[in-house]
Image (spheres, grey):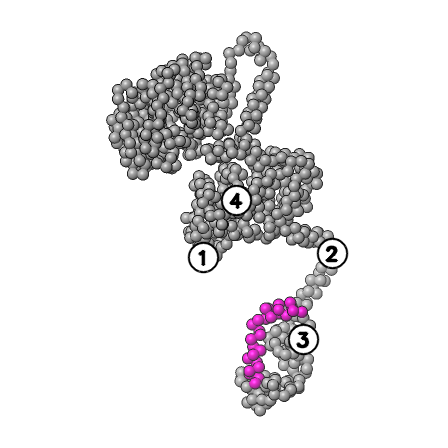
Amino acid sequence: MEFDRHDGPGHVHKYDIKLKTKPKDGVILQLHHTVRNPNGENRRIRFSTGAFDDSQEKLACSDTVGNLFILDFTELKFWKFPHIGPCTALHFIPNRTDELVVTNTKKCDISLLSVETGKISLTLTGHTAPVKHISFSNNKLNNLLTASPVEAILWELTHYTKYFTLNTYLGAQIQQILFTPVSDYLVACFQNDTVQIWKHENMRSVKQIIPTDLKNMRNIAFTMDGRAMAMAGISRTLILFSMDTWKALKSIDLTKYGISGAQHIAFIPQVFDGGANKILGILGSDCALRLLDLESLTILQTVSPLSSGIRKFVVSRTGKYFLCILKLGEVNIYNSSYVMDQPQQPQASPNTESLLQSKPMYKEQAKLTMRAEVEHKMRVCMDSVRLRRILMQYGEYPDKFRSVIWRSLLETPMNKVAYSALIEKGNHPSYKDIEKQFTIHSSITLKNLKRLLSCLAHWCPLFGVMKCLPGFVFPFVKVLQKDPLLLFECVATILLNHCQLWFEYAPFPPLSILAMIENVLGEHDPQLLKHYCDVGINSQVYALKILETAFSEVLTCTEWLILWDHILSNEPSFILMAVVSYNIVQKNAIKKLKTQQQLENFFHMQNPIDKKTFLKKAYMLLNDTPDDIHPRRFFNSFVPLDKGVCYQQFTGYPKATICLKLAKKERDKIKKPENLTLKDLTTRTQEKEIKNRFVSTSESKITRSDDDDDTEELFTSSKYVGKHAKKKQSCLNMGDKKLFKERHATYLVPKIDLKNKLKSTAKDKGVCKFATKGKGKRTGDELEKVVEMLLKSGSESDT
């Protein structure tokens, strides 16, 4: 990297970086800072220290001049902050977004700096010597520990005040001091080969360790679970110490591996070690980094760059990356998995080398042997408790092993015979033409989707009529389509366990599930629920749409995979808590939407979300929801698919409703369309048009006549509903009468007005005895005369 451009604080230019996809030596990126002197000569500036931020996948490196470089491995960008000053230690602040602790050599102060803008938000003073060590506590006290060789200070992070100060004396200066990863201990390594352990809460001394076999101690390191500590120095011995029993576990002679002394040690976490790290990185006196397996006591790999020796190395918290600062000032950034995958090259004899060259099949056999060993280790580690511990530590499962881990979590039986029986039935009629319903560009994905849906429909008739099923299973097809058997059994197990009570009212919405979600939302965020009620939407919009697509419409691919890592690792009710969590986390954006259409669109698109906050909220809801409304009350425990020649039946749906719907589909399928010619269709259309015109003409024309037929037509029209009309409609059934009244409700009102008008008019004309039913019987002729008089008087008044 070579540039000198910077436009002041707050304005940062970012530059692209390119990582090596398949490095031969494990180096994915190499940093060197070269500047040009006024005389035109190039000058190399050496890097001094670095630190990783695992949550954002960032790296901070500083050089000896005072420049600070930030590298973002997610966006593949880097930028520079000049004039920060020579840094002696760097550390990203955990659980905060893009903040870095920087210690300055000249002023001996501690600064909190934004890695996006370069602005310093806070400066802590109090040290009398340059700070060499920075550590953050993991317990509820939330302290920051900074230490120089002569003193250590505990800072309280709420108000950034001094909490405790540790002073040393000459001959017992601090070599290293840090918090243990899990427990509440603070451990310091002193120059007089003494290790002191304090209780963090009250700073009471708990243990003092003085190893007799270890001299010139330089460094200590802890496993991720905090149960073991490694101690090493400029001597031939390395000691493993148990923090549970306060006893030495193992003493290792480093001279057996060609290591005369250790300048620096650090554990390198692996994916399946569950925090009990087994690989220790040792930087020897020969400036070469060796990776030692503490179980087999073998060197797995030796990292020794050809250009220069290694002066210092730093490992990320998850063990995904580590960097080596070379003596010439360059920085090599390694991907741990790439380094581990490289076979260790032993010193072979000439005969062995010629044999390997003549028989290249040995190389393939070595790869197969290594793969078998990896699979064996995975089977040993594949219990749900250990996998869940890994998930809580790293936040997700590795992409490389995700399908294997899901298979272990769901306990899929891999019934090849039972699956073959479903495949032999062919494509199900319900999904024969599914390509007409969905636009899928990949023919392979379409074929796998059709095969999965057909197998599910053959397994249970319910899945042949559920319209939401293709949208639910499609993301699983994209992830697991390379193994169709695993894909089917994973989806079937999810439908059997994590989709309990979804189909109890099929094909109608799952009212019980939606009620559970609404109760949990009302318990934890009643204001958001009130907003939904004010807008006029229900749980079918803010919950059912998410469930029907398995979160695939609202999350990105990476976020979806991480979420389902957690869903499959927890109890079946976790998926409902995830729905509520998504609504609560997106509350600020949701409350700005005021119409139903806007909210419906919101739950059909991807919206930016902090996945850590989203998952943390889901776990909080899972643990803090009261038992009386918790969904786990209504769910059964996890049940895997049966192992054998057939799968168990899926029974969580109303069979009578589904059978009726299937029978209706069969009837519609059996009905064959009439074979009509063009002449027949034209004739039928003309007859229909003539009939419609005749009906409309007869309804619009209402004439007055002296004949009985004309009078009857008047009273049976939809404009006047009288006694004769009721008699004529008596042949209708009750359903038709109800339908008639609903459609002509506005025309039933004039009947009362007509009777009153008849009564008043007849009274004025001297025919009051015919106006009411209670005074004598009216014949048809008398009633006709009264109506004629009414119409005549009405026409005269209108005139």
Magenta stretch contains residue 761: no
- In the image, residue 585 sits, relative to residue 407, either above or below, namely below
Query: CA separation, marks 2 and 3?
Result: 36 Å
The residue sitting at the bottom extreme is: 766
**Callout 1: SS:** helix
CB within 8 Å, label 4 to label 2: no
Left or right side of 486 for 540: left
**Callout 3: SS:** helix
Whole-percent x, y for residue 409 in the image: 55, 35
Residue type, numbered disc 1: Asp
Whole-percent x, y for residue 260 in the image: 40, 13
- In the image, residue 243 sits, relative to residue 725, either above or below, namely above
CB within 8 Å, label 3 to label 1: no
- In the image, residue 263 sits, relative to residue 529, either above or below, namely above
**Callout 4: SS:** loop
Whole-percent x, y for residue 120 in the image: 30, 35
The residue that mark 3 highlights is 728
- Which of the numbered marks, if any, corresponds to residue 152? none
- Earlier in the chain: of badge 2 and badge 1, it is 1
Query: CA separation, marks 2 and 1?
Result: 52 Å
Query: CA separation, marks 3 and 4?
Result: 61 Å
The residue that mark 4 highlights is 573
Residue at figure coordinates x 68%, y 46% from the top left: 429
The residue that mark 2 highlights is 674
**Callout 2: SS:** loop
Residue type, numbered disc 3: Lys
Q: In this orientation, which residue lies closer to the viewer: 328 or 155?
A: 155
Q: Which residues are magenta?
A: 733-759
- Earlier in the chain: of badge 1 and badge 4, it is 1
